[in-house]
Amino acid sequence: MSNNKINMEEQLVTKVVTSDVVSEVESNYPETTQMFKNIMQEKYELFCLKQSNYGPDNISLGTTLEKKEDRKMSQMGLWFRMNDKIQRLKQLVLLGNKDNVGESVKDTYQDLSVYGIICQIVAEGKWGK
């Protein structure tokens, strides 16, 4: 059997197993899974709104991200942004400090989740395409 055929069969088995697991989890935890889907859709819409305002250059730093060094620099910038958010959560959640700028804990979690997805897109070299 060729490697291509084996790989296709493995992918099919993975899809079937994943589908079964997803169905099981959705059945066992309907409110949790529905809320997860709703939050993901909300994050996608927020991403699109911000993308229309900023464009891709704020993440790609004006490069095409074709070079490994450019992707690394972009990811470093994202790391700094994520670290800012984590430090904010530390102040608000762990230390119980008051919010003085109008960015809620929920907003901060949202930003972190979107940055995490953007990091994955950058790492794959698909940002701005």
Image: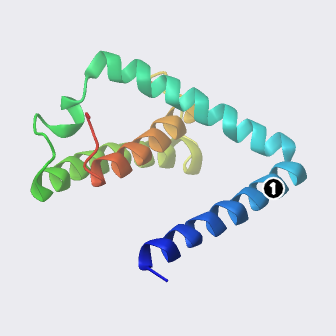
Q: How many discs mark residues in the rendered view?
A: 1
In the rendered image, which residue does mark 1 sit on? 25
Q: Is 123 drawn above or below residue 104 in the view shown?
A: below
The amino acid beneath tag 1 is Val
Q: Residue at x 71, y 66 (%)?
A: 17
Q: Quadrant of residue 105?
A: top right
- The answer to which of 44 and 115 lies nearer the viewer is 44
Q: Residue at x 49, y 43 (%)?
A: 113
> How would you rate the neighbour count of disc 1 (Cα within 10 Å): few for under 14, some for 14-19, many for 20 or more?
few
- The answer to which of 55 and 66 lies nearer the viewer is 66
Which quadrant does the C terminus fall into? top left
Q: Answer left or right for 104 relative to 79.
A: right
Q: Answer left or right for 47 relative to 77.
A: right
Q: Position of residue 104 (x, y in %)?
A: 55, 29
Q: Position of residue 53 (x, y in %)?
A: 31, 16
In this view, the residue farthest toward the bottom is 1
Q: Residue at x 51, y 23 (%)?
A: 45
In this view, the residue farthest toward the front is 1
Q: Quadrant of residue 81?
A: top left
Q: Position of residue 125 (x, y in %)?
A: 25, 49
Mark 1: secondary structure: helix
Q: Is 96 drawn above or below residue 1 in the view shown?
A: above
Q: Answer left or right for 14 relative to 26.
A: left
Q: What colour scheme governs how the chains and residues are painted in the rendered image of this protein?
A: rainbow
Q: Residue at x 62, y 64 (%)?
A: 12
Q: Is 51 drawn above or below residue 90 in the view shown?
A: above
